[in-house]
Amino acid sequence: MAGWDGIGFVVQAYQKRAPFVLDFIIDLARRSEHRLMIRLVKGAYWDSEIKRAQIEGLAGYPVFTRKAHTDVSYLACARKMLDARNDIFPQFASHNAHTVAAIYTMAGPDFAIGDYEFQCLHGMGEPLYGEVVGTAKLNRPCRIYAPVGTHETLLAYLVRRLLENGANSSFVNQIRDEAIPIATLATDPARLVAQSVLVGAGHPKIPLPASLYGAARVNSAGLDLSDQSVLEGLAVVLRRSQYLSWSAMIDGANADMVGDVRNPADLHDIVGHAAFATPTQIDQAMARAVKGFADWRATPVQRRAEILKRAAEILESRRDELLGLIVREAGKSLPNAVGEIREAVDFLRYYAAQISAQFDDETHLPRGPVLCISPWNFPLAIFLGQVAAALAAGNSVIAKPAEETPLIAAQAMEILHQAGVPADAAQCLPGAGDVGAALVADARVQAVMFTGSTDVARLIQRELAKRVDAAGQTVPLIAETGGQNAMIVDSSALTEQVVADVLTSAFDSAGQRCSALRVLCLQDDVAAHTLAMLRGAMAELSIGNPDRLATDVGPVISAEARDGIAAYIETMRAAGHKIHQVDLPPAARDGFFIAPTMIEIDDIASLSREIFGPVLHVKIFARQSLD
């Protein structure tokens, strides 16, 4: 590489970190003694950056929310680059006449070929750079850059360019509008910023992620997992969590009733201990729930809302320790664990906001003790979502968490009590299916909330149908069950985007979501290309213990789940279906792992039930037979 100055970087000025990135590259150029090229652009993914920050609940935006701020940033970065032109080769990509004129002025009259250059996209900005290039004009060089490739490769790029330059605020778009005065187009962005009421303030119509819901509620706080300092802190949290032991006990539990709770990714790791409820404890808990209902229903609506909001605050304050527990007990990856806590916080605040705005103590009357049966795949979010809804309405709650994840549920219940929910108004009864069945059959239960399999939901429905009140009404059942989620992909879809979305939907959380993709329907015109790319992407998935930040796919929840999925895959293999399955790493033998699997099928009707794991079915269809 000695003597070669062909390495270049692109810096986007709409990013708040742009000046610091430039400092780094300039320093790198000086230390390496290579005159690195730096291409300065304003940025083409603004809407994606904003949406990502909102979705992930970040503290702020990585980009400027006002166009004038981006324009000022571009000029500031340009000056920094021009000051270092002996160490780097400045390249300024812009179709804005004011920006070009400003850079020309900042650079000064002295110029030699190689000092700097302008750049424009082929087919755009030609009238502008007709005034720049040539001895009779400004006599500065302009490099024309053009995308090269096939239609399939270029379409997405060209669409992005059209969106970028077709925006109402784009100079290229505005210059065509005769109603916009030239003086407006030539306004110095620094002057616009200086005239602001509050210099540096964000756009008033783009609230910070925490304020997305306005006065109704605060958005849950996320973590920027692309930030190295955040990742370093989380690594410390995960290391510490390995030495913590948790418990889920019931009043009066005996030592012989206590069992180990093991990490599904590493069976040598005992996460904690749990006691399952006995028939006597079930009866005692129901008696307490009846008593607790009388007191809790008398609690004013606004007081109940304040308690739920307080629970959300406590939950966020305990995020770090709970992340480690969720990773170890539920086998969730770190991003999924973060999302789990955020969803639980959102549930608490959502129901608090709902009753604050809509409930009235005189007209919205509670029913009585409510049984909440939650699943293991969202052991905190759905557990608290069910419980919060019932408590918000003034009901007392008996919560029966999944037998695989009682420790997380116990911590959630502790947080509710710490926030102010009376112990008799909300109780947690760990146990297997027999505990849930006994609770469903108890006549003191006035409503049931259930998330799980369709088969179990039908059993609950049949049991509740036996109990009819004087008005001929059965006990209400709110059930959320599974199904076969499909994605239909035709020839117009961008293959790279399809593969990225399929990978996330089918294999994230080891496919253990009711929303996970189960059936990919591919148009035959693009099937071969898409499947080849998908197989390659599957090969890059990192499978292993989710306590490692690099892990993409963790374990399934239990031996029963693993064995059932494995048996299904072998059944499909024996039936002659084409199967692609990645290899499991040696460490997978320590836990309940299933390799991400793709099975080609001829008929969707052959899928008799949902396979709750990292298994994707592919159905290829002809364009004319989509219906």
Image (cartoon, helix red, strand yellow):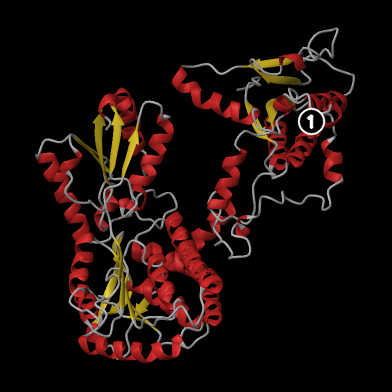
**Residue positioned most to the right:** 109
Q: Which corner quadrant of the image does residue 592 belong to?
A: bottom left
Element on which disc 1 rests: loop
164 over 259 or under it: above or below: above
Q: Give me the residue at 67% from left, 18% from top.
A: 124
561 over 434 or under it: above or below: above
Instruction: Give the image location of residue 134, x and y in percent.
Output: 80, 8
Q: Amino acid at mark 1?
A: Ala
Q: Give me the residue at 41% from left, 26% from top.
A: 492
Q: Give me the residue at 36% from left, 40% from top.
A: 502
Which residue does the numbered mark 1 point to in the structure image? 84
- For the image, the number of numbered tags is 1
Instruction: Give the image location of residue 259, x and y in percent.
Output: 25, 77
The answer to which of 520 and 213 lies nearer the viewer is 213
Q: Is residue 476 left or right of residue 66?
A: left
Instruction: Give the image location of residue 426, x and y in percent.
Output: 39, 82
The answer to which of 111 and 169 lies nearer the viewer is 169
458 over 284 or under it: above or below: above
Q: Give me the residue at 68% from left, 35% from top.
A: 25
Quadrant location of the N terminus in the rendered image: top right
Whether residue 61 is visible to the viewer of this picture, yes or no, is: yes
Whether residue 93 is visible to the viewer of this picture, yes or no, is: no
